[in-house]
Amino acid sequence: MNFPALLLALMFGAATVLGQEASPTDHPGVLLAQAAAPGKDKPAAPAAPAPGPSDTTTIPAHSAAAQPAPSSGGLVNTMTLWKLIQDGGWAMIPLGFLSVVTVMLVLVYTFTLRRGAILTPHYMNTADVLLKKRDYLGLLAISSRHSESVARVVQRTLDFATKNPTASYEVVRDIAETEAASQAASLQHRTVYLADIGMLSPMIGLLGTVLGIIRSFGVLGSGTSTQSRDILLASGVSEALVATATGLVLGITAMFFYSVFRNRVQSLVSDLEIASAHVLGLIALNFNKKREQSRVAVDDEF
């Protein structure tokens, strides 16, 4: 009898007996090896018994992962605009008033700061014709019915010239330049309100933040609240910072529109200066003609 063949047969027999007696949860690797090993006379492994009520078998990982996570929809806090306003404290009252004023100023400046409010081609053509004809009273009457800035300059100048016919051209020119400067200053002063709002809004928001933090630390120092100190401090600071954020947003918006309207005013002031210089040039020509005519009359008399 061959000894290696006998030893190999004994090893296969022992492996078969151990595989039948072992539990599926104890040696899963052996069962897999027996299922994969070829053999015709090898008996099939018995099925694992169903776990009883008292068994403490662990739940497989794939079944635990398949369970849906608990929904957290009830813990989500919806933040609305009115809630933000309430969290901002008393500083939101002046900031709300300034925001309404800012919107009103932007709408007013959009419709009033335009080239048609400074001069119109129709008025300038009419002024040219009447000044060349030296019809000062007619141009004065027409200027009083127009609302352009250059019409205000012409009206003030001609009103002084007609009431003081002996005045020199230098005096009339000073009157015209003074009125033109007054109209230009009026245009520039309109946009200053937006700059003031842009500077005051962040300061008001910062003041509201400081007072909110002081109130929050006061609650922490009193020790009357049952909540955690960290929760109280975080909620107080977040509510106080709402005022600062609102003030910054309002200030940035006001300064943006101020820069836009300031550039527009500069362009309108340039147009007003050009139109005033044109009117003064025509008035100067008429004064020169008047002086020449008076000189010719004096020469003829002598």
Image (spheres, rainbow, N blue to C red):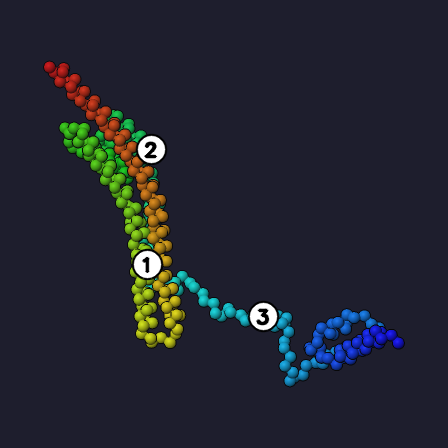
Residue 93 in view of the camera:
no
Give amino acid for label 1: Gly
Q: Tell us which disc is closer to us: 2 or 1.
A: 1
At x 31%, y 70%, the residue is: 218
Give left or right: position of 41 versus 133: right
What is the number of the mark on residue 68?
3
Q: Position of residue 34 (x, y in %)?
A: 77, 73
Residue under circle 1? Answer: 205
Q: Quadrant of residue 2?
A: bottom right
- Given residues 90 and 47, the one toward you in this image is 47
Q: Amino acid at mark 2?
A: Pro
Residue 41, quarter of the rendered image: bottom right
Q: CB of mark 2 within 8 Å of CB of mark 3?
A: no
Q: Is residue 70 left or right of residue 272?
A: right
Q: Which one is in front in this view, the residue at disc 2 or the one at disc 3?
A: 3
Q: Is residue 94 above or below residue 139?
A: below
According to the picture, the residue beneath numbered tag 2 turns out to be 121
